[in-house]
Image (spheres, rainbow, N blue to C red):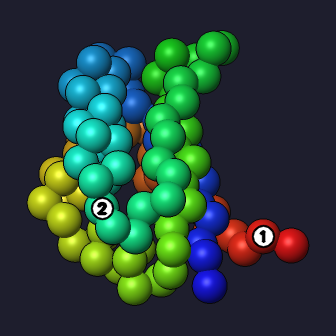
Amino acid sequence: MKIYLTAIVKAKPVFKTEVEKVLKNMVLQTQQEAACELYTLHQSIEDKNTFVFYEIWKNQTGLNLHNEQNYIKEFVGLIEEKLQENPLIFRMKLI
């Protein structure tokens, strides 16, 4: 079953540039993963510190493998210090 995922990431203003760089690297790396069908990054027009990922994964196994990659671990390392809050992650199915 495909997994549709939306993730909302809010950087602290002082770390926006650094967080954005890490997020853009995640896009470049993730789009090469075999189970990734779509992985896009968006930035809020109203709040430049808010980023939104929209993702489509072939299956849960592929998403699990994605979450084990070093570039994802690098992002996880930012959460406590450089984000305003934990990312909001919505895992969905198409209906």
Name the image quarter holding residue 83. Answer: top left
Can you see residue 87? yes
- Mark 1 — residue? 94
| Mark 2 or mark 1, earlier in chain | 2
Residue 15 drawn at (x, y percent)? 27, 23
Q: Is residue 78 left or right of residue 93?
A: left
Viewer can see residue 76:
no
Q: As rendered, which of 4 and 11 lies closer to the eye?
A: 4
Tag 1: Cα neighbours inside 10 Å, few (<14), some, or many (≥20)? few
State which mark lies toward you, 2 or 1.
2
Find out whether the residues at labels 2 and 1 contact each other: C-beta distance under 8 Å. Answer: no
Q: In this view, does 34 lie above or below 88?
A: below
In the rendered image, the quadrant that contains the C terminus is bottom right
Q: Which of 30 and 69 is in front in this view?
A: 30
Residue at (33% x, 21% y) in the render: 16
What amino acid type should be assigned to the residue bearing mark 2? Answer: Glu
Give SS at disc 1.
Answer: loop
